[in-house]
Image (cartoon, rainbow, N blue to C red):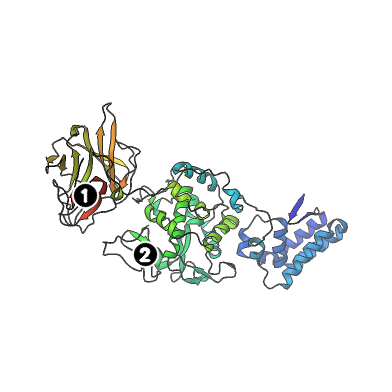
Amino acid sequence: MCSSIPGLSVPVPTVSRRKERLSREAKSQPSIGHMKESKLYRLRHRNSRFETFAVFAHSTPRLAIRAISASFSLRLSSSFLWWTLSAGVIAFALFSQEFSGRAVVDELPHRPPRYPCEDVSGYYSQVELAEGVKMMEQLNLLISDHHPLTYKEVWDALEILDAADVENPDASSDIVEIYSLRAVPKSLAGKLEGWNREHLWPRSYGLARGPSLTDLHNLRPADVNVNSSRGNKFYGECLHEDNSCLRPANSEAAPDTEADKERWAPPVQVRGDIARSLMYMAVRYGLHQPIGSPTLQLSDSPSIDGARMGLLSSLLKWNEADPPSKSERLRNNRICSLYQHNRNPFIDHPEYANMIWKTPARANSVIVSSSKGWINEFHYRNKGKDLNEFVEVVVSSLIDASRLKLVLYNGANGKMYKSIPLTGEAFSITSEGSEFLIYTAPLSLQNGPADGIALVSCRDDGTDEVIQFLSYEGVTTAIDGPAVGTRSLEIGVRETEDSSKLGSLGLTGNGLRTFQWKRFTTNGSPGRLNPGQDLGDP
């Protein structure tokens, strides 16, 4: 049996009975139980024989010399080269103050890759570029077979992965907190005045059991107080019209953080890092999960019950605005080589994100797709008890409106909760002298997030045609009803708890090709054209 050393092929002598006895005697000595192994060595448990011996020589040189002497006396001719190499290792260990376990197990530049993930180009060689679920399936298969850690092992791992000195993590006495970007002593781990382990994808959003709880791609050190402030808020910037926004998000957080009652925006410097971590989680734990384990998803309609984290649109934007840094890539490399033996694909290939989650087109920048009819205005929320809720649809006078209906969808589960024909008793009809009719109905609408409104037409063959499927406060995919399998278009504006009962959301512009969604604060106009709206020709 041979052990490969870069550049050489050296026979390793077999162990004689005398050597075995010497080894047992050596193991019985108390000093071996106190080997001064580095944290990197302790976790790199599958080292080659040569690497293991190098760290052993550094930790207990006298015992190593005895072992080599025994080997030398037993098989002088066959092990001379082995003895020479080993003696050199011991000399290096004894006389170099800079020699450490990290140098052996983390910085061997010429050794062949031990785990497939260490060969980055080879790791992705079988991935065929695709879109959506097909791309997710390939990446899930690639990264799912990884070595899980215990919670105790996570503490030690974070001290290496997030060390303040990224080049010499084992020697660094500090770690860097993810939301404050401060360097704080490793010794404050788990203390009230110190730092703890932050799950970027919160535990309450589907991290029920198993490796998802200790996955290092999702864990970062965070200040205890700042971590508490973040809680399980989803990621995203504050709404511009929301006066409850805090900047910074916490007095001990970085100055460019912000938060409101639902959202949390981390420091700009690490927004891309966090986005890519959540993308990894959605791929790793979003497919083929054990029975009883939630399947994680990214969405613009976050839901604890649905294990949906977000905001997807913000994460996609952050991924592009903040590309992977040297330290982020190094962290990915170390998770691969030292701990889990898998990689975060979105650090190596940020472009994979848009292949899976293309940024959904916003309806406020999309031309009305059909002159048959469209959803023109609605009101769903205001301060206090919701009043004056309605939906308004504009339909060409050339169309048989009896074929049209509105279908309302619940964003929390993608299911329809109401269907109303346009020619039923609920709708009133008005005309302003154009070639279009305005159908308006007082309807109780859900307050979001991601609730949808679909305008549906019945074809001659009796099947449904979805003319338009809009949503507010997020994106949803219908799982039943006429729009089943269809992804909504988010209109990009919303009402809040402070909105007026006289307000609405509606289209404005001159002609179908220029329409955009706008929030009308106090001048909603059910049954009439919206302020600044000209229908033009059909």
Q: Where residue 351 sits in the image (x, y, percent)?
A: 48, 51
Q: Circle 2: is it few (<14), some (14-19), or many (20+) Cα within 10 Å?
A: some
Camera-nearest residue between 216 and 16: 216
Of the two numbered discs 1 and 2 in the rendering, the one whose residue sits closer to the viewer: 1
Extreme-top residue of the structure: 461
- Type of residue at label 2? Ser
Q: Quadrant of residue 37?
A: bottom right
Q: Is residue 37 visible?
A: no
Q: Residue at image x 47%, y 48%? A: 283
- Type of residue at label 1? Asn
Q: Residue at image x 47%, y 54%? A: 213
Q: Where residue 443 sits in the image (x, y, percent)?
A: 18, 44
CB atoms at circles 1 and 2 under 8 Å apart?
Answer: no
Asked if residue 402 is positioned above or below residue 178 in the image, the reply reads: above
Disc 1 element: strand
Say whether disc 1 or disc 2 marks the residue closer to the N-terminus: 2
Dot label at residue 53: none
Q: Is residue 222 visible?
A: yes
Q: Quadrant of residue 262?
A: bottom left
Q: Where residue 66 sits in the image (x, y, percent)?
A: 79, 65
Disc 2 element: helix
Q: Which residue is mark 2?
A: 229
Q: Which residue is mark 1?
A: 510
Asked if residue 233 is positioned above or below residue 132 in the image, the reply reads: below
Q: Where residue 207 sits in the image (x, y, percent)?
A: 43, 51
Q: Circle 1: is it few (<14), some (14-19), or many (20+) Cα within 10 Å?
A: some
